Amino acid sequence: PEAVVLTVTDNCDAPVVVYAEESTQNADQNNAAHYNYTITRTWTSTDVTGNFTISTQVITVIDKTSPVFVETLPVDLTVECDSVPEAVVLTVTDNCDAPVVVPTEVRTNGSSANNYTLTRTWIATDVAGNSVSHSQEVTVQDTTSPVFVETLPGNITVECSSVPDAVVLTVTDNCDAPVVVPT
């Protein structure tokens, strides 16, 4: 808060109030002491005969407020292996400084190469040590079967001397390149 202006009364004269302020704030904005410090305010009034009065106010400034995410936070998802979204870029606001959001992503393998979980975490810590974090679980699954590229041969009835050779078929898949095994 702004310093108040104090006035005094005296039984003999009109003394003047002298105001002084000292701060322990560190000038380095990357130092926690820039945001956690004390201000000592002193008002001194002395009359012409040397009688005086002193009033002191100590203000302790503490940054206890964590940063706040600006964007809508990503939610947990279950997706196909070909639909994994890119990790979003998150930003934060803070009451005192401008912390940076640090993202991480950890992959936990599942039952196959196309079934796994991504754990995405975003953390922002201000200079005073206050932090905020958010995590998102992206469960990746391959639930789509391969699809034949060619028209599939139909059932036929033939003479024993006219059995056609097996047709080589190929497939496409959204996640990998499966092999067609004739039986």
Image: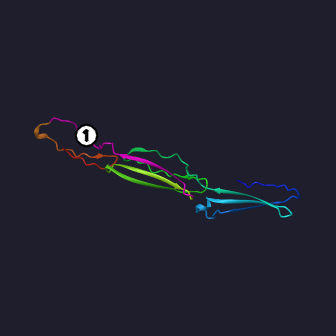
Q: How many marks?
A: 1
The vertical placement of 34 against 89, above or below, is below
Q: Where does the image place residue 143, in percent across and percent down from the top left?
A: 33, 42
Give whichever of 4, 50 is nearer the camera: 50
* Helix, strand or loop at mark 1: loop
Q: Classify residue 122 as left or right of residue 46.
A: left
Residue type (three-letter) at the residue carrying disc 1: Leu
Q: Where does the image place residue 170, in percent across and percent down from the top left?
A: 27, 46
**Residue 18 counted in the magenta span:** no
Q: Where does the image place residue 17, in percent across and percent down from the top left?
A: 81, 59
Give whichever of 139, 44 is nearer the camera: 44
Give whichever of 119, 2 is nearer the camera: 2
Q: Where does the image place residue 27, in percent across and percent down from the top left?
A: 64, 64
Residue drawn at the location 21% of the way across and 44% of the way down: 167
**Residue 142 counted in the magenta span:** yes
Q: Which residue is mark 1?
A: 152
Give whichever of 132, 136 is nearer the camera: 132
Residue drawn at the location 40% of the way across and 50% of the way down: 118
Judged from this view, the residue extending furthest toward the left is: 161
Q: Classify residue 158 as left or right of residue 83.
A: left
**Mark 1: few/some/many CA within 10 Å (<14, 14-19, 20+):** few
Q: Quadrant of residue 151?
A: top left
Residue drawn at the location 24% of the way across and 47% of the way down: 180
Q: Quadrant of residue 106?
A: bottom left
The residue stretch that appears in magenta: 128-157
